[in-house]
Amino acid sequence: MEKIYLFLCPNTFTKIDWERFEVKYFLENNKVLIFDLKNILYPNLKKNDAKEYKDEIIFRFKNIYQFIKEFTKLIKKYSVRNICIINFVKCERFKDQILLLIISFLRFKIISFYNPGLPRLKSLQYFKNNNKKAFLYKKYFSFYSIKFIEQILFRYLFSFIINKKMAILGNVRDKKNILKKYPFNSFISGSSWDYSTFLRNQDEDFEMELKDINYAVHLDGCGPGFVGDEELTNLDGKYYQPEKVDSWYPKLNRFFKFIEETYNIKYYIAAHPRTNKKIISELYEGRKTFKNKTIELIKNASLVSTRGSTAISYAAIFKKPVVFLTSNLYNNWESFSNNQKCYLDFWDKEAINVDDVSYKKKFVMPYVDINKCKKYVNLFLSSNEKPNYFMIKQFFDTK
């Protein structure tokens, strides 16, 4: 009997996900189903602008009973041994853990991922390094440490039950760390999704109307104009953005105008996939805005700016100068400042605070450190020159 690839996706499945997770390559020789589990796993998340991608192979469920019914039907039709699960569900919340236990007890073949594609803080590192008052430490450490220990215990249980039926795809530099987290599973060398996209498209010429124009590109974040992933990543599970629309974007536009006038350069916007391109263009005073063109934009840009985006990968790949932007409010947001610090430490840079207009006197166009770019690719982006879909299919074909 033919095998079927089943994608388990915890968030709203979009057109970007279809392309990013290389679905068309799995469809070449096999059947594919995509289970969008957002309504089951995260029914109370604040609505964002992520547009549901609709296709006959994408299933969405109103409740857990619909999911169980469809899942049971799938098992009866194909049997467990012929269903290959490509899993994006993490083990962070109780519902996630129940789902992962079910698929582990049923002994499916599974591939999961540890390929963030960016420098990360080590677990609990910022608790050890910060110098905040004791009451703040106690306020968060108790909650976070309990959740942290719970996740570790569950990961070990999940890893033990599923055993070699599951492989983790990641960078070989993270192999030791991955196998500590999942000691009973296999490891597959792979890439971040951004780098895998680059591998699939590296022979394309990327012709664009902007090819002969001197321009900078800003990698726009989702917030504050739109709801991003903060609700999933904040410790308390609540959505939070320190900046407001009417404060953040005018400050960015002031910085862009300064760069444009000083260096005779145009500024363009690479819109976040979960935003509305037209609205983003309006927020950036009518500047030309592109969606789903990040690789092309960065390849031909003279400068890249960001608050902190995984798409900075392409700046490293194409060896482009990078500017990191922040504000007083973002600096006071611990989650943001810790994450941005990872980038700043690696690139040996200081962020430009758009609240402090003294940057107009201090700013110098950054140079490109070629060795750091190569190191960034090797450490965080890839340890394999084959796209991820190739490695995933190879795993399922040989097990």
Image: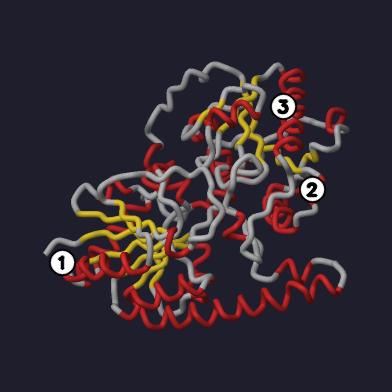
Q: Earlier in the sequence, mark 1 or mark 2?
A: 1
Task: Say which residue label 3 marks.
Answer: 256
Say if 40 sits above or below 241 in the image. below
Task: Say which residue label 1 marks.
Answer: 77
The image quadrant where one finds the N terminus is bottom left
Q: Quadrant of residue 10?
A: bottom left
Q: Amino acid at mark 1?
A: Lys
Say if 124 sits above or below 210 in the image. below
Q: Quadrant of residue 135?
A: bottom right
Label 1 CA crowd tier, 10 Å (few <14, some 14–19, many 20+): few
**Where residue 385 sits: x, y (%)?**
40, 49
Label 2 CA crowd tier, 10 Å (few <14, some 14–19, many 20+): some
Residue visible at 48% across and 67% down? 90
Residue visible at 25% across and 48% down? 56
Label 3 CA crowd tier, 10 Å (few <14, some 14–19, many 20+): many
**Where residue 180 sits: x, y (%)?**
52, 76
Horizontally, residue 163 falls left or right of residue 319, namely: left
